[in-house]
Image (cartoon, rainbow, N blue to C red):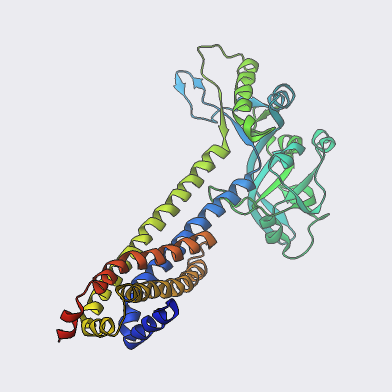
Amino acid sequence: MNLKATVQVALSALKANKLRSALTMLGIIIGVAAVIAMVAVGSGATARIQEQIQSIGSNVIIVLSGSVNSGGIRLGSGASQTLTIDDARAIAAECPAVEAASGTVRGGAQIVYGNSNWATSIQGVTQEYLSIRDYSLTAGQPFTSQDVDAAPKVALLGKTVATNLFGDADPVGQVIRIKNVPFTVSGVLAPKGQSPTGQDQDDTILIPLSTAKRKVLGSSQANLSSVSAIMVQARATNLMKEAERQVSELLRQRHRLQASQEDDFSVSNLEEVFAAQESSARVMSILLAAIASVSLIVGGIGIMNIMLVSVTERTREIGIRIAVGAKKQDILKQFLVEAVTLSLAGGVIGIATGLSASAVISFFAKWSTMVSPTAIALAFGFSAMVGMFFGWSPAKKAAGLDPIVCLRYE
């Protein structure tokens, strides 16, 4: 019997018991759908974290003021501002592995425009900050190094601030008030979305560092040249560690710290922290897929059980076929084709179900999902292997039956 005839006989046998065939496929359908949906959820989480990491900027290192001792009391990190604008300039000029550095100060204020107002964060930065954080503008112009030196009252608005103050109107050239100080909006920042820590990166206003120190945030600063943090950009990803080392050595030297003294600053590689989150999401994706794969094994066991029952029910049919000339190989192929057909059909329906489940999860749970073609191919291929593996034993049993015993079977 050729393969085409074998397939036709196998399909006829499956059609004769449609309900049982459908229930047998159910385990494979659930398994394939679960694998696709779980991998989509995990991949979506990983992709989201990658987007958030990229929104921070490339090769970014952040330097914060460290803890200090005051009267025998050890104050926490950032309790005293030990970093200065000159530290930032020295890092950019004297560290070969560093591309750029920007001192920053931060505070909060109620922003007023006409009858609208909005509470947001104010950041005083230099022009290098925009390139370090990969900021671009959707409207207007960024401030320049001359602006930072002259301390003009200009501001760059984040998308969230611009929307809440101006709605759909163009804010460029308009005057807003920050702590009762009038500022002209010089541009609107391109949206970045949430940070890996969940903060809205578009809910901010950037102003020149000198302006922030002298006219907005400076009244609360003990030292006009101090900054709360220094954002540093390494020249390349493979130079991140070297840049950290150079920055630490330079700051210890500038702060005149002895070998026995602890750093009065902290240097953090943000990409390492976020990469750990990305790795965790990837491991979770693999774990979810592995758990979902158990459903495929259960589905395979269901196929084997049903096929064994089918062999018993069709014992007399097997005997008649052998008696009229069918070979054991034909019987083996027929039952094996039945098992694989059940598995593949379940795989196809499972793929459709998995794609639908991914879309439903994304819509109702507001969770980003990303369907992987590789996951679809692996799930479908695995379902075929399950059909062959668990269908082999019943098929072999059917092919090994004694035709005389089969003909006597009632």
User: Viewed as shown, does residue 388 lie left or right of 259?
Assistant: left
User: Viewed as shown, does residue 316 lie left or right of 277?
Assistant: left
Q: Is residue 81 above or below residue 139?
A: above
* Res 136 seen here: yes
Q: Residue at left 21%, top 74%? A: 401
Q: Residue at left 63%, top 41%? A: 107
* Res 216 seen here: no
Q: Is residue 287 above or below residue 403?
A: above
Q: Which percent across, then down, holds residue 108?
A: 63, 45
Q: Which percent across, then down, holds residue 174?
A: 81, 55
Q: Which percent across, then down, holds residue 3?
A: 43, 76
Q: Residue at left 82%, top 49%? A: 141
Q: Give the camera-side residue of 227 and 181.
A: 227
Which part of the image, by quadrant, shows the C terminus? bottom left
User: Viewed as shown, does residue 219 lie left or right of 374?
Assistant: right
Q: Residue furthest front?
A: 325
Q: Which percent across, then down, holds residue 391?
A: 31, 69
Q: Give the camera-side residue of 155 and 292.
A: 292
Snapshot quadrant of residue 245: top right
Q: Give the camera-side residue of 353 and 319.
A: 319
Q: In this view, does 212 lie above or below 10?
A: above
Q: How many marks?
A: 0
Which part of the image, by quadrant, shows the N terminus? bottom left
